[in-house]
């Protein structure tokens, strides 16, 4: 029997389908992680656990993955893999009647379906005449924008020098960043300019655009793929060449001279080989490696192979390997509900990049990956967790509010709507674009912002927005995100709490911040995580942002969650909503496992009172005691009332009033700034000072329950009156006619009412209990 690692994290144990799972796409991809040397594998899928009723047998597999060509009939199945006569444990899965049937033909069939001449990415030669004619009607407005960009680019140089080598980031990070950043943005802008010029040529037939674009592609093709832009030395420079370059070459193909084309083909042949070696031969993406940047490179390699396959014999091998990776394993930072573990900024970049391949495959090969549930889910996730008015962008790295990000987000959601046939996001897209008009551009080399795949899409009529549903809570458990939103439409009345407790842990661009939250009231960000993305691994990043202390989370005697760990996982559990309240539990036990066996955050939103009730529950591991500390961060100073154990935040008419349910010895700690601060190599005028509040019940204990009421108000909403007291061993908050009682260790006792639950709530005359199983009406 093969001894496989069984682990909750999909990057440690990537086996798919998971045991007793119900894949939502049919056929599912099969993936396993061999514990030993590479070799040949066999895969068996059967209808019985004894493995006798075989429905699929695949032998001689050289990679530990397979995406079957044909869908399965609905029903229960069993599967295993073997190597050298040894078998892995048997897993089961079920194909439901409502699973999406998506049969992906072989890579050889892709190439057969693609046009045998150029262009072939997003359109074929037969569509060029109509494309050019549309400049005067359906594409007139977009053509004017494209032409303006192209004319501006014509005035620039079409030569770029090979970049310098990078300094050692371990010796002087600031010096490294000052060299690295200009290379990234200048090379990115240069090659994106080639794509824009090539598209302008395709759309108009104007030879000026074609010649300028060709000169740019030829210039970067003089770079040494194994020199200063080698993937292993500076992957951003390498990716600048292969990101937009292959599409530009496809559209310009017959405008190069023979000598130029030979140079271009050789450049991309070697870049393709290096990329494949990096992602397949040095660990297989989606099986043994999940590094963030490789999630871009798989797309770029696929497009490169589709463009150059007649001239690069290895291209079909690349595409055959990429077929299960891109059409089955992806995304590795989320699953079917559309959430993205690395946060909305990185989700925007990486999902946007994936649309390049999905659209090329759909238009060129008639394979529609947009039918996978992830896509509509991703649009809904973005709408829920990133309000158009947001002053702070989600969790994880990159939290700034840039005009380009808002416009790119609108374009992505609109593209998903168009490709999936949805009709529910038009209002959100319009809100993002309206908001972007009042926003700043990012201070760096300006990259032309124009989407070729959107320009080349067939024009469609805008869909009417559906009636907004009345839900407050939307949960995306696959990556551990949730959003309490009182309205998706009107910033002036939206009370929003965005929450994260992720099963993907504290790795990559995520931080040690399970059970973290961001709070917006009437369009103003009242509380958010602390710190700014001053560069990956910089002093500020590694010693402030990665730490739990910089987040709206619990710390235990200054100790935070386990950092940079696949084991530091969380989850969003037991979601509940009725007409009176919503409830969710964030479970972060594993994130504090070095000192706690339980660390959970219970969240209740009282609809009529516009109040959040937050209860943190801590139980130590045997032999360890800790002080539970409640942390919060804001751009505005906290006004504290020590005697009342309360605080108040005000920002442009929006208010949060916090009331701690703890009437024994306790204290507040207030501070501001950062230790260490962001460096000077990457500065931003959005990096405002932040203020920090910590509330600590005195004493080192083995267990503690701490409640806090967060009452919200704005111009059109009075802040609810909250009165707190301790009665015996029970902490109580009276919020208008409603009541919250928290068990402080010896049960809840209020008058004749007694119980052992963590908390009880009396809301609108209805009694609820909060305990291990979530919330229920009693």
Image: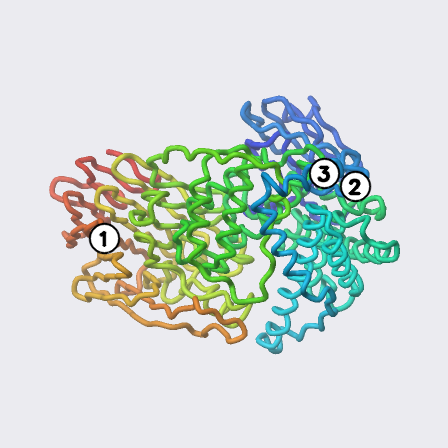
Q: Is residue 149 left or right of residue 439?
A: right
Element type at mark 1: loop
Residue 333 coordinates in the image, percent (x, y): 56, 48
Element type at mark 3: helix
Q: CA distance from mark 3 to mark 2?
A: 49 Å
Earlier residue among tags 3 and 1: 3
Which numbered tag is attached to residue 129?
3
Which numbered tag is attached to residue 40?
2
Cβ atoms at labels 1 and 2 below 8 Å apart: no
Q: Is residue 597 left or right of residue 408?
A: left
Quarter of the image with the N terminus in it: top right
- Mark 1 vs mark 2: give the one in front: 1
Tell me what residue is drawn at x 83 percent, y 47 percent.
Answer: 314
Q: CA distance from mark 3 to mark 1?
A: 56 Å
Earlier residue among tags 1 and 2: 2
Residue 141 coordinates in the image, percent (x, y): 56, 46
């Amino acid at each position: 029997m093969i001894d496989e690692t069984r682990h909750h994290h999909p990057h440690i144990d990537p086996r798919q389908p998971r045991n007793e799972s119900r894949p939502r796409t049919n056929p599912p991809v099969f993936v396993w992680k061999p514990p030993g040397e590479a070799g040949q594998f066999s895969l068996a899928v059967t209808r019985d656990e004894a493995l006798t009723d075989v429905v699929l047998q695949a032998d001689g597999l050289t990679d530990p993955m397979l995406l079957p060509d044909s869908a399965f009939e609905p029903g229960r199945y069993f599967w295993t893999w073997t190597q050298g006569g040894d078998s892995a444990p048997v897993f089961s899965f079920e194909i439901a009647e409502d699973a999406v049937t998506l049969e992906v033909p072989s890579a050889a069939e892709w190439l057969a379906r693609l046009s045998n001449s150029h262009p072939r990415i997003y359109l074929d030669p037969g569509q060029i005449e109509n494309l050019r004619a549309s400049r005067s009607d359906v594409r007139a407005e977009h053509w004017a924008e494209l032409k303006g960009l192209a004319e501006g680019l014509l005035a620039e140089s079409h030569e770029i020098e090979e970049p310098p080598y990078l300094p050692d980031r371990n010796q002087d990070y600031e010096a490294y960043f000052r060299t690295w950043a200009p290379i990234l943005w200048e090379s990115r802008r240069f090659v994106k300019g080639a794509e824009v010029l090539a598209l302008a040529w395709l759309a108009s037939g104007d030879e000026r655009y074609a010649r300028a674009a060709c000169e740019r592609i030829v210039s970067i093709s003089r770079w040494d793929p194994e020199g200063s832009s080698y993937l292993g030395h500076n992957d951003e420079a390498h990716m600048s060449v292969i990101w937009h370059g292959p599409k530009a070459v496809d559209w310009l193909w017959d405008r190069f001279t023979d000598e130029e084309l030979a140079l271009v083909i050789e450049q991309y042949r070697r870049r393709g080989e290096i990329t494949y070696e990096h992602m397949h031969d040095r660990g297989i993406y989606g099986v043994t490696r999940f590094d963030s940047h490789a999630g871009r490179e798989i797309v770029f390699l696929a497009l490169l192979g589709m463009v150059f396959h007649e001239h690069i014999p290895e291209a079909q091998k690349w595409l055959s390997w990429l077929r299960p990776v891109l059409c089955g394993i992806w995304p590795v930072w989320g699953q079917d509900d559309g959430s993205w573990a690395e946060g909305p900024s990185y989700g925007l970049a990486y999902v946007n990049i994936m649309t390049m391949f999905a659209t090329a495959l759909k238009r060129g090969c008639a394979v529609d990956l947009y039918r996978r549930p992830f896509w509509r889910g991703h649009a809904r996730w973005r709408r829920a967790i990133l309000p158009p008015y947001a002053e702070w962008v989600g969790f994880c790295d990159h939290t700034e509010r840039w005009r380009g990000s808002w416009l790119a987000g609108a374009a992505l959601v609109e593209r998903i709507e168009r490709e999936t046939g949805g009709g529910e996001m038009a209002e959100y897209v319009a809100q993002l674009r309206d908001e972007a008009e009042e926003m700043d551009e990012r201070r760096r080399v300006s990259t032309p912002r124009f989407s070729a795949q959107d320009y080349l899409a067939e024009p469609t009529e805008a869909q009417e927005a559906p009636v907004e549903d009345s839900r407050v809570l939307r949960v995306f458990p696959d990556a551990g995100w949730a959003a309490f939103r009182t309205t998706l439409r009107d910033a002036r009345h939206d009370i929003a709490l965005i929450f994260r407790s992720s099963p993907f842990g504290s790795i990559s661009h995520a931080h040690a911040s399970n059970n973290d939250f961001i709070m917006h009231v009437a369009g103003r960000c009242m509380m958010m995580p602390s710190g700014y993305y001053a560069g990956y691994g910089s002093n500020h990043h590694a010693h402030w942002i990665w730490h739990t202390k910089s987040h709206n989370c619990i710390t235990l005697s200054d100790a935070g969650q386990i950092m940079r760990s696949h084991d530091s996982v969380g989850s969003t559990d037991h979601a509940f909503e009725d007409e009176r309240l919503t409830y969710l539990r964030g479970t972060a036990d594993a994130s504090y496992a070095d000192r706690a066996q339980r660390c959970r955050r219970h969240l209740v939103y009282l609809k009529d009172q516009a109040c959040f009730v937050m209860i943190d529950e801590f139980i130590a591991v045997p032999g360890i005691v800790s002080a539970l500390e409640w942390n919060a961060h804001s751009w505005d100073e906290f006004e504290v009332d020590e005697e009342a154990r309360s605080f108040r935040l005000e920002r442009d008419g929006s208010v949060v009033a916090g009331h701690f349910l703890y009437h024994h010895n306790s204290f507040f700690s207030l501070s501001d700034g950062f230790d260490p601060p962001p460096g000077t190599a990457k500065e931003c005028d959005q990096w405002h000072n932040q203020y920090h509040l910590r509330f600590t019940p005195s004493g080192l204990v083995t267990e503690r329950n701490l409640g806090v009421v967060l009452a919200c108000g704005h111009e059109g909403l009075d802040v609810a009156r909250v009165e707190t007291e301790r009665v015996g061993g029970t902490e109580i908050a009276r919020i208008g006619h409603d009541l919250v009682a928290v068990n402080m260790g010896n049960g809840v006792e209020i008058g004749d009412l007694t119980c052992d639950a963590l908390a009880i709530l009396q809301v609108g005359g209805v009694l609820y209990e909060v305990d291990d199983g979530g919330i229920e009406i009693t």
